Image (cartoon, helix red, strand yellow):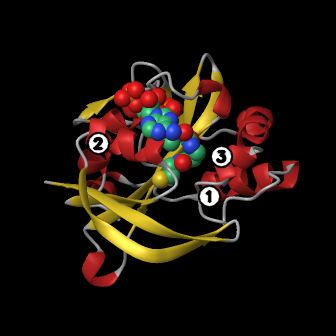
């Protein structure tokens, strides 16, 4: 995917990780230190905490329907199997107090949008409003610009989600516009607010 990714990926993994983490050109083994959390690839051992934190209607309500609800054990297995197969790692666990409490990742875009990536993130309700995602997104955005060959990172936020808008604003993303009545979620038609940061 990225310039650096294709240059350095001789095996199957690239990114923040146990063995090969390139961060600002430096290798680190532990993961990305985001201050209040650690960002690292998903591991099979995360299954129980993934399902525990992801199985939340409050978390699901402001995410796309592709994020399952209820979030079953099988959903957790499928997600971890998918992540384990990623040739270029783009999805990561957010580890708080030793457990995988949420996720963050980028989706590279195709064709003429190929130097853009959409960022997505969620955190278990137990950890909300402690500044964890603000710190995680700040660190991850720096990482993503470095790791993937992108010049634009964007997020689409449902108009029902002021907390996420606040996170993006605190992290330096710019509110670019509104995609009016573009989302159907939980039986409601919502606007989507577009945020982006470029370099
Ligand atoms: C959105 C989400 C990631 C925020 O994570 P978090 O760790 O609680 O975020 P932070 O604590 O870093 O920041 C939250 C900010 O929103 C503010 N906030 C929370 N609820 C709010 C509300 N109802 N109205 C306005 N602001 C609100 C907080 O006060 C805080 O801002 P502040 O630091 O200026 O006080 C988390 O709520 C979540 O996972 N939600 C479900 C999934 C989701 O929406 N993902 C994003 C999709 S775009």
**Label 3: which residue?**
59
* Lateral position of residue 44 relative to residue 199, left or right: right
Q: Are marks 2 and 1 in contact (CB under 8 Å)?
A: no
User: Label 1's element?
Assistant: helix
Q: Position of residue 146 (x, y in %)?
A: 24, 46
**Residue 58: assigned label:** none
How far apart are the alpha carbons under marks 3 and 2? 20 Å
Q: Position of residue 74 (x, y in %)?
A: 85, 54
**Residue 169: assigned label:** 2
* Lateral position of residue 139 relative to residue 132, left or right: left
Figure label count:
3
Q: Earlier in the sequence, mark 2 or mark 1?
A: 1
Label 1 environment density (alpha carbons within 10 Å; few <14, some 14–19, many ≥20): few
Q: Position of residue 156 (x, y in %)?
A: 41, 62
Q: Name which residue lies at 45% across and 46% down.
A: 162
Q: Quadrant of the N terminus?
A: bottom left
Image quadrant where residue 154 sits = bottom left
Q: Earlier in the sequence, mark 3 or mark 2?
A: 3
Mark 1 vs mark 3: in front: 3
């Amino acid at each position: 995917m990225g310039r650096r990714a294709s240059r350095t990926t001789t095996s199957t993994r690239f990114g923040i990780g146990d063995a090969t983490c390139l961060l600002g050109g430096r290798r680190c083994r532990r993961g990305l230190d985001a201050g209040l959390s650690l960002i690292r690839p998903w591991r099979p051992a995360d299954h129980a905490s993934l399902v525990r934190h992801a199985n939340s209607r409050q978390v699901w309500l402001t995410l796309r329907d592709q994020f399952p609800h209820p979030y079953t054990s099988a959903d957790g297995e499928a997600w971890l199997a998918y992540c384990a197969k990623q040739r270029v790692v783009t999805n990561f666990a957010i580890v708080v107090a030793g457990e995988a409490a949420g996720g963050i990742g980028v989706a590279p875009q195709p064709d003429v949008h190929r130097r853009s990536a959409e960022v997505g993130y969620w955190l278990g309700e137990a950890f909300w409003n402690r500044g964890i995602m603000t710190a995680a997104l700040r660190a991850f955005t720096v990482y993503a610009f470095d790791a993937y060959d992108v010049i634009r990172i964007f997020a689409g936020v449902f108009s029902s989600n002021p907390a996420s808008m606040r996170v993006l604003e605190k992290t330096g993303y710019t509110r670019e516009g509104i995609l009016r009545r573009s989302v159907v979620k939980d039986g409601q038609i919502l606007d989507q607010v577009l945020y982006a940061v470029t370099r």
